[in-house]
Amino acid sequence: MSRFKVVVTDYEYETFAPEQEVLSEIGVELTLAQCHTEEEVIAACIDADALISQYAPISRNVIENLEKCQVIARYGVGFNTIDVEAATEKGIVVGNVTDYCLDEVSDHTIALLLACARKITKLNNAVKKGIWDFNLSVPVFRLRGRTLGLVGLGNIPRTVAKKAQVFGLDVIAFDPFVPETVASELDIRLVSLDELCEMSDYISVHVPLNQYTEGMISVNQFNRMKKEAFIINTARGPIIDEQALIQALQVGKIAGAALDVLEVEPIAPTNPLLQMDNVILTPHAAFYSIEAENELKMKTAQNVADVLSGFYPTYFVNKDVKEMVKLKEKDAK
């Protein structure tokens, strides 16, 4: 019998061997569920010692009904599905994994940028329709010397910057939480969001979704962008005001967009973005590789194992909870 009840609230995975490899060391067998509503999460997890969650809503209502939960670990970097404040108030540690897909998301971002710059998708579709004409891509601009603006300068966009600089792109960024000295060491100039929109030929979004970033790229920002600018989003869909984006594309305020994430996923069949040949869409796939998925699963499980073993996890969202929970630091003897 398991020492602890650990519930996976929802999942899209076919195997849990990586998680079980980690958790078996503390005598845990996973309980698998497929919860889509708050009520389903409460029913499955009311007596759980730990939750592992992918997309299920871990709201204040859910958290207040958890009787003995010590840790909520999310599969991923973002944690907007979890009411972190409510978890902190109840003394529940919240964990995520911040570094499992740096190469994957940065590679995907660069791939989308190159596809926009070279009009790859448009030309591919034309050739497959029997049209052999490079003029369909006009205008195409040389990458070297043009400007990439990064909205956010955390781990992923820093990796994007290194790869973009190899192509000769100048990189600027907006991130009020990053010191000038740090940006300077990366050969990146910090600017305001307005300046970034005005200066950038390519804009790539890399901020977490929260109350401050939802809709932060909207009408005012699109009005400031160059007509030849492309916007790329591999972060979270609602960071961009989708209706404002659609309108900007329809009237030619910007040249195009490449989106791995959308306000509503999967995309609705009536969404106008599907009919635009200057828009590239991928199905929230930037994070994925076989290696990244395995790493994510093991590190998520390790967050749970750490807390249930009496330690603060390596990946720790709500450090304010230390005022209520007295665990050991992992390197403490």
Image (spheres, grey):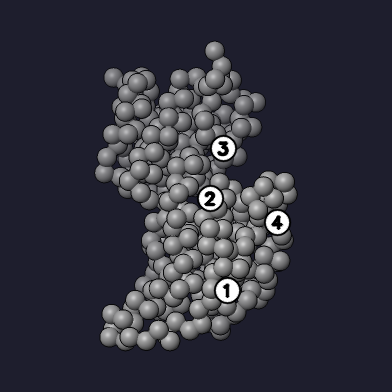
Callout 2 crowding tier (Cα within 10 Å): few <14, some 14–19, many ≥20? some
Q: Residue at x 65, y 58 (%)?
A: 173
Label 4, label 3: how many angstroms apart (C-alpha)?
Answer: 26 Å
Residue 102 bears which disc, if any? Answer: none
Residue 97 x, y percent position in the rendering: 48, 39
- Mark toward the start of the polypeptide (4 vs 3): 4
Label 2, label 1: how many angstroms apart (C-alpha)?
Answer: 21 Å
Callout 1 crowding tier (Cα within 10 Å): few <14, some 14–19, many ≥20? many
- Mark toward the start of the polypeptide (2 vs 1): 2
Q: Amino acid at mark 3?
A: Val
Label 1, label 3: how many angstroms apart (C-alpha)?
Answer: 35 Å
Q: Which residue is mark 3?
A: 317
Residue 134 x, y percent position in the rendering: 40, 84
Q: Which residue is mark 2?
A: 159
Q: Which residue is mark 1?
A: 229
Residue 126, picture quadrant = bottom left
Q: Amino acid at mark 1?
A: Ala
Q: Which residue is mark 4?
A: 190
Locate residue 180 relative to residue 326 in the image: left or right: right
Q: Residue at x 39, y 69 (%)?
A: 268
- Mark 2, mark 1: which one is toward the viewer? 2
Callout 3 crowding tier (Cα within 10 Å): few <14, some 14–19, many ≥20? many
Residue 109 x, y percent position in the rendering: 48, 59
